[in-house]
Amino acid sequence: MNYFQVFVKILILIIFLLGSASWAEDSNRRTPIVKAVEKIGASVVNINTEEAAPAVRNPFRDSRNPFFDQFFKEFFPRLNNNRRSLGSGVIIHPEGYILTNEHVVAKATSIKVTLIDKREFDARLVGADIKSDLAVIKIETKDNLPHVDLGRSDDLMIGETVIAIGNPFGLQHTVTTGIISALHRSIKGGKNRVYRGFIQLDASINPGNSGGPLLNINGLLIGINTAIFKQAEGIGFAIPINKAKRIINDLIRYGKVRRGWLGVSVQGMTKEMRRFFHIDTIRGVVVTQVMEGSPGARAGLKQGDVILSLENNEVSDKSDYSERVSTYPVGNTIYMKILRDGKERALSLKVSLLPKSRVVDYVQNWLGFTVNKIQQSSARRYRLATSQGVVVTSVTPNSVGGKIGIQPGDIIRQVNQVRIENEKDFRMAIVKAAGRDSVLILIQRGQNGYYVTLEP
């Protein structure tokens, strides 16, 4: 072997060692976070919406001189253009279904979606739910789109590393990381509303991040980022994916969430009740009524039971209970822990719609009155001047309806802002209203109309 061959072999060995070192360095740099971003980055989209701005009247308008109209348009163009907003979303199905926040697409007259490869699509709203602040939109393409796998949020750990991807302030595909700071967080929003059950993380969720994915270290979707706390710095919130899972199918199939009926009435715990039940902390609600044949009755709930938790999450008060129950659409099963006779028990309850055949019983037992169609006899008896709506024929003293002031002869014109023309309309409206924690009714008495809110 001559010197030249030795030199060549040594050179090859050096190149190999340098390449190996470079590969090892790259391997060390490709952390789980990098891998997670590489895995699902292409499924994150930018959402651009347009909302029609209120018409602004030109104070200088003069039909005889159009100069002022042109002046107004040129110098105040923003007052005449549609308003634009930015948000994020994540593809959850290869056919183009995208999960985002309801407030990102609310009131939008047009929705544009931009993928990471700069392709732009018109999107249509499939379904939205203001109560959960979730929406599903869809883009049409013949290609199978990259999509994220849904994880779970019932096993999250405080201190766990999480990844947020979105488009804050229009900066596309911005990645931030942090840890889970708290779970089951409740915060106050606008119009005296309380948002419950959020994941709190130590990364800011700014406008434009809304609707983007929150991922765990394995690149699985565990939440939808939501910017609702404007004063926060270094604090973000996300909707748990388990909550979203329960309503996605309803949004896709029906365009809305079909909230069901449990046939269970509850009240909050007082200090005296906590002492009676030997409960040290402020938690739980007491079952005050269970309707015969209802989902609650079939599950075995009884009057006097204390509901302690839903899906292993403690129930703090009646509002918390109502909010959590409302996230379970028709067909879902709620697993709960109750306290009965000093012992804790586990029950499962399947959410269903109120059967039309039980509407009369529900209205009488839960709302405290009976109704009938407006006939000539009832029109004469109550001196009614209309045949539209249904007339209240009796009211149970000290019932929900009786305490709010409903009287025989009152005409019900609306239920939850649904117009009531006849008994059929009333039955259909009550079926939908039975799954809510309150019912808004428009009452007509004589020539006057007023709204009342009933909380069964």
Image (tube, rainbow, N blue to C red):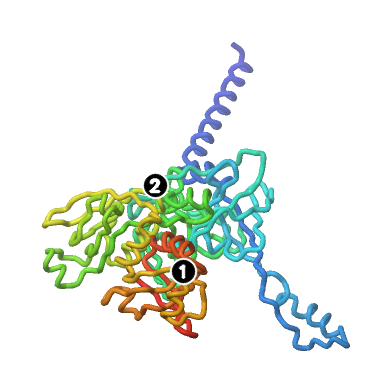
Disc 1, SS: loop
Say whether residue 66 is left or right of residue 354: right
Disc 2, SS: loop
Q: Are marks 1 and 2 in contact (CB under 8 Å)?
A: no
Q: Residues within 10 Å of mark 2 (few under 14, many from 20)?
A: some
Q: Earlier in the sequence, mark 1 or mark 2?
A: 2
Please tell me in which quadrant of the rendered image residue 239 appears.
Answer: bottom left
Residue highlighted by disc 2: 152
Say whether residue 141 is left or right of residue 63: left
Where does the N terminus fall, quadrant-wise?
top right
Q: Mark 1 is on which residue type?
A: Asn
Q: Is residue 214 visible?
A: yes
Where does the C terminus fall, quadrant-wise?
bottom left
Q: Mark 2 is on which residue type?
A: Arg
Whole-percent x, y for residue 400 in the image: 31, 73
Please tell me in which quadrant of the rendered image residue 198 appears.
Answer: bottom left
Most foreground residue, 451 or 64: 451
Q: Residue at x 51, y 72 (%)?
A: 388
- Between marks 1 and 2, how big is the CA–CA gap? 34 Å
Q: Residues within 10 Å of mark 1 (few under 14, many from 20)?
A: some
Residue highlighted by disc 1: 416
Is 97 placed above or below 9 here? below
The label number, if any, that marks residue 441 in the structure image: none
